[in-house]
Image: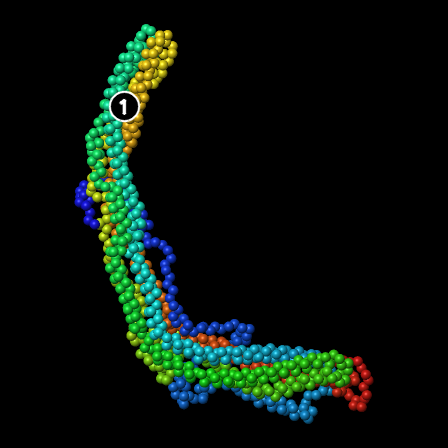
Amino acid sequence: MPAPPARRARGSGSALPLPLSLALAWVLLEPARSQQCPSGNPLVHQFLEIGADQRVPAQHRVPCSLDPLYSIVRRYLDVIQQNPFPTGLLRVALNQPSSVRTSQVVHYQVGYVVCAVIAALFFVAVPVTGLCFCCCRRRRRCGGHIKAYRRSLACWRNLLTVCLFLTTAILLAGVICAFVANHWVKEQMEPGARAVPATFRTLRQHVSSIPQGVQSVVEQFAVPRQQMISDLDSISRSLGLSVHSLLKEQVHSALEAVQGRAQDLQNSRHHMESLNKTVGTLTHYQGELGLALRGRKESALSLLDDPRCTSCARALDKAQQLELGADYRRVPSVEKVLKTLRSLPKANFPDLIRQGNSTFNSIPGHTVGKMARLVQELKDEVNQASGKLQSLADSFPVARHTQPLTDALMQAEQRSRPYLQEVTRYERYRWIVGILLCSVVLLVVVCNLLGLSLGMWGLARREDPSDYECRGAAGAKLLLVGVGFSFLFSGLLVLLVFATFLVGGNVQTLLCKNWANREIYKFIDTPGNLPPSMNITQQLGLKRNLNLSSAYQRCKKSAGLWEVLQLTDPYSLEDHLHISQYARDFQKRLENFNVQFDEIYLLDGAGRQDLETFRQSGLDQLDYPAFRAEMQNPVVRTSLDDLAKDLEGLQKIQNNSTMAARLASEAQALRKIQNTTVLTQDALVAKLNESVHFLSAMAPHLQLLLKQTMAEITLVETLLPAKAQRHLRQEIGCFTRKQLGHFSQYLNWVRRTLTEDVASCQPLATALDNGRVILCDRIAEPWNAFWFSLGCCTFFLIPSIIFALKLTKHFLPIRNRLVSTASEETYPFHIPRVTALKL
């Protein structure tokens, strides 16, 4: 809509008036709040959990009551095996097994060799000693009864009792620990064996699902894309409404000011016409009233001056003032002002105001039309971003390396199953044998405890040391039964202890210890240590040697699998996920968009000319005080009503009836003038006063109001396009940041999902840690605690045998008794007398 010529020519002045300058400064210094984006919580997109189901659950070492025992066993194994990790020996064993010399193995396993020699000696010596003891007992040449009583027997017997009890307590504690550890080994072996193929399977699924996971991650761009398309569909109208809302107060204020000045113009013209007409009417009525007053004055004076008129002097004075009071011929002329106002308004102000409102209210629709093409281009840019993201999936480097890694994990899973099945089967046998042998030790403990209890009970009941007491004898026989079990099963015990010790000890010292301090990783990383068939780099088809130590550390920190594999082709995920790659054109189009609001105007040239003519009409230059001064004069200098009342009063006191009649007639004539001409002029004066009051009240402010209105209209029409444009740029900037936020949120999710879930290397590190926890913390430690506890029980069987054999004699009756403490001479044929000695 082109602007009218008058509007285009209005800026020819050399300077803006003061109100316009102030308003312009107010607009330019508008508070900074309009330059800020609206606050609020950004939209958080909900993406699918991709690859989370392929995570390897982390295993942790569970504290238990055997932890002090585990610590003792580890210290003991550190003493047994003090040699460092056998790098050279393992290198030769893996690459050239036939070149391994026995002396090298013996030198490295010298601690275990010493333990093996001790176990062999125990295996041979204890059963042989037991066989010799049985033969000796059969010939009654060892053990049996005490042959003579001595005073020191009680102390010796008590010492043996305490030693056997402490030894039995140690055996009981050891066998309890052995039972618990044996149970823990069985409880952890089966789930640990099942966890190995399950871990391989989870890793294989994780690796094989990487290409599909990357594609699924790319497809999740549909979530922010749908939101961005929805935002684009509403952005144009939203921007228009925002601009409309921002400028509404100023525009409406300007239009209200125009409407007010138009109303002032209408009212001023109405009152000016009323004033001019009223003054003319009053002037006309004043001529008629003057003639009537002169006739009444002459008549009244002649009547009142008549000698026959009684007491008429006071009324005579009032009658002499029957003259006109106000002369409206003396008020200023308003013809020139009225002539100017009668030509106004030439413009149709109601239509102008409606048109201004309509033009301003069309801003949202105008913005929608202007942005239609831009919105479509932005939608195309968003759709093109999907193609760019697809290139991320196509160029992701792990996809071509997943198949060798999947095959390797599949092969490891298949190869582990038979071994794990055998391990589980042999573990069941070991558990049964361990339970049986622990039961033997427990049986020895029971025999010792029962033997001690019955023996001490028998001694307490026996009055004579030579008397036979069945309880003491039963206690002695139970101790001998325990000794027999000890001799009989000690060989099997030491064989089981050494077998489990050899396996568990080497697992702890050779594998677990060096696994924890990562010596094994260093061994694998050293070139030449592993044979080609075990080279991870070759199996995975990598062109660079894989450093397992560095890879493990980076996997622990949630590095991506493509980073850990050290692929030949350099690949930077950050370069592919940089927001500028996808939103550069999108942002550029928004920044270059511009909407012109030049066609917006509120008042045309005719309306401006009307207001300017109104301002220069001279309405504010009229002599309103002259009007007010003339209106303060009464229409008649004396009150006709009061004079009529005085004449009527005089009528009553007159003696002459003719005089009384003439006074009554004169009073009636005065009232007639009062009720017709004077009252009419009073009404005209009141009407004149209303117009004068309105015009005089508005006149001092007329110039300022019109200047402010013109300045406000000029300001709005001049700065409205620029301010709308500035606000539009601000809103587009906020919208751009919001859309880039959608991009950024999605790309951050892609980065996190690819690194932590889809193509994360952390499951590999977790699997290695789980393997160490399962093998070392949950299986090897209770395994070692088992053989250590059972070994302690086995070696404490020797003092148990010695103390039990020594204590057996004290529970049997004494064969011969001393008859004199002063002589050691015995009398074989002497019949001893009864004594009350007790042991």
492 to 593, vertically: above or below = below
**Residue 457 appears in the rendering:** yes
Where residue 223 sits: x, y (%)? 34, 65
Colour mapping: rainbow
Q: Mark 1, residues whose alpha carbon is within 10 Å: few (<14), some, or many (≥20)? A: some
Closer to us: 280 or 787: 280
**Residue 160 appears in the rendering:** no
Q: Is residue 190 left or right of residue 829?
A: left
User: Which quarter of the figure has residue 561?
Assistant: bottom left
495 to 272, vertically: above or below = below
Circle 1 — which element? helix
> In the displayed image of the protein, which residue is found farthest to the top?
307
Quadrant in which the C terminus appears: bottom right
244 to 553, vertically: above or below = above
Where residue 24 sits: x, y (%)? 26, 44
Q: In this view, does 726 lie to the left or right of 441?
A: left
Closer to us: 305 or 246: 305
Residue drawn at (24%, 20%) of the image: 287
Residue drawn at (19%, 45%) of the image: 4
User: Which quarter of the figure has residue 119?
Assistant: bottom right
Instruction: Please tell me how many numbered marks the rendered image carries.
Output: 1
Residue drawn at (44%, 73%) of the image: 57
Q: Is residue 211 left or right of residue 465?
A: left
User: Which quarter of the figure has residue 618?
Assistant: top left
> Circle 1 sits on which residue?
630
Residue drawn at (28%, 39%) of the image: 260
Amino acid type shown at disc 1: Glu
Where residue 413 sits: x, y (%)? 42, 81
Where residue 742 sits: x, y (%)? 33, 62
Q: Is residue 24 left or right of residue 184?
A: left
